Amino acid sequence: MSDDDSVNNDACSIGSGQSDNRSIMDDVNANDSEVDEIAQQEAMEDKLREAIDGLNQKCAKSRTTCFNGVEKAFTLKYIPDFVEDRKMTITDSIERALKKGRGEEQSAAARLANLVCVQLGAFDSAEMIGKDLKTVFITTANDKSNSPSARADCYWALSMTQFLSGNDAADTIEIMQLLLSVFYDSASVNLPAMQATVLSAWTLLLTLVAPSDVYNLINSDTTDTYMLSLNQLRDLLESPHLELRLAAGNALAVIFELGREYSDDDDDEVLEAMDLITILKDLATDSNRHRAKKDRKQQKANFRDILRYIEDDEFPELQVKFGHETLYLEDWCSRIQYAACCRMLGSGLNIHLAENKLLREIFALGERVLTPQSAQRRSNKHERSLLNAAAFKARTRQRNKNRDKRSAALAS
């Protein structure tokens, strides 16, 4: 064999070795990335287990810290299997905190109850937990010795867990009647913040009521129902409290939407008799200097949309982009439900919209969409092992061939 042939063979050997090294490094990097992700997941779960164990500490401040830690983890991660395995422990801790805790601990426990239900939406246990906690929520919320903020959070949790854990019509109507009685009571003792929360909770459940029922109740003379009258809501638009004005405006928009969905009757006479358009126009163009600039901006933005819908039947379509998907909010009911989920999940909402089966069902997003990267990451482990073994075997054969050629060249 000539020296040129020997050199060429060496070059081939070096070239194939570089190619092999690149493919090996690609596999190593992919495996390292997967190992890092698994390690992070395990570390997160270890910390979460610690926080769940801490829900039963003797110190109230420490328990509250643990409630807040678990709440944060449940907003930022969708881990239904993990929660399902520990649902009884978490639920017992929530119930104990609502019964024996005070103030912020009760509020934190109520918020966590919502998150347990949204995590377990794919399981039947979510409905069971909602029913188990219902009585405790009502007892805690109705106890006037508790702080108004804790009571408001319990009323909101009562509505939210009902919305998330199952749409039983009888239970929904029962809770709406309770919220309405609390709404009147909180108005009599001047608790506008709690009154606004209760009205928002009532409106959330109103989105589940059949349009025919809403239309018939609004147009009937019956007073002992679960419905607020249009005149009552109109009066709330003139409240000095921004949250109460906004809650009343949203409730009006939902009522008109459900009523129009059932009947095409012209409601101009109703609007004129209530002088509702004039009031909404004033709120949509409010320039009172005694109100904070931020409050005026929020009020005008909301009431412009409400006015446009009630006066011209035009809904401003909203688009929420998350990942490679877009959620279209095309009516007031879905807008109210989306706002409730924002209040519950905060910055973690986009993660849950992408992965959470319950939220995807609520907003009609269909089956979960996997990106090419996530699909690759979740491919079958056994299949990956077989592919890696086949690639390793092919590389070994190629190396052996090159070694044989080089050995023959050196021997000659």
Image (cartoon, rainbow, N blue to C red):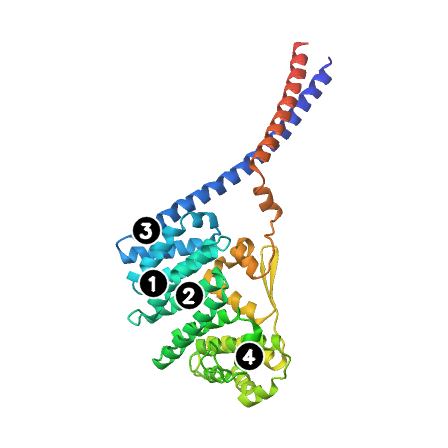
Tell me, for residue 402, which label it has, or none. none
What amino acid type should be assigned to the residue bearing mark 4? Answer: Asn
Which structural element holds mark 4? helix
Q: On the image, numbered disc 3 is attached to which residue?
A: 54
Reading the chain from its start, which is encountered first: label 1 or label 4?
1
Front position in the image: 67 or 39: 67
Reading the chain from its start, which is encountered first: label 2 or label 4?
2
> x, y percentage for residue 202?
46, 72
> x, y percentage for residue 28?
55, 34
Which structural element holds mark 1? helix
> x, y percentage for residue 256?
57, 78
Kindly identify the residue that appears in the image at 54 percent across and 75 percent down. 213
Does any portion of residue 297 appear in the rendered image? no
Task: Tell which tag, 1 or 4, sits nearer the viewer.
Answer: 4
Q: Quadrant of residue 183?
A: bottom left
For residue 347, side relative to residue 367 (left or right): left
Which structural element holds mark 3? helix
- Distance from label 1 to label 2 (Cα)? 13 Å
Circles 1 and 4: CB distance less than 8 Å? no
Q: On the image, numbered disc 4 is attached to which residue?
A: 216
Front position in the image: 208 or 336: 208
Single out the residue that lies furthest toward the top. Answer: 412
The local crowd at label 2, few if under 14, some if 14 to 19, many if 20 or more residues have their Cα within 10 Å, is many
Reading the chain from its start, which is encountered first: label 3 or label 1?
3
What amino acid type should be assigned to the residue bearing mark 1? Answer: Gln
What amino acid type should be assigned to the residue bearing mark 3? Answer: Gly
The local crowd at label 1, few if under 14, some if 14 to 19, many if 20 or more residues have their Cα within 10 Å, is many
- Distance from label 1 to label 4 (Cα)? 38 Å
Circles 3 and 1: CB distance less than 8 Å? no
- Distance from label 2 to label 3 (Cα)? 25 Å
Q: On the image, numbered disc 2 is attached to which residue?
A: 158
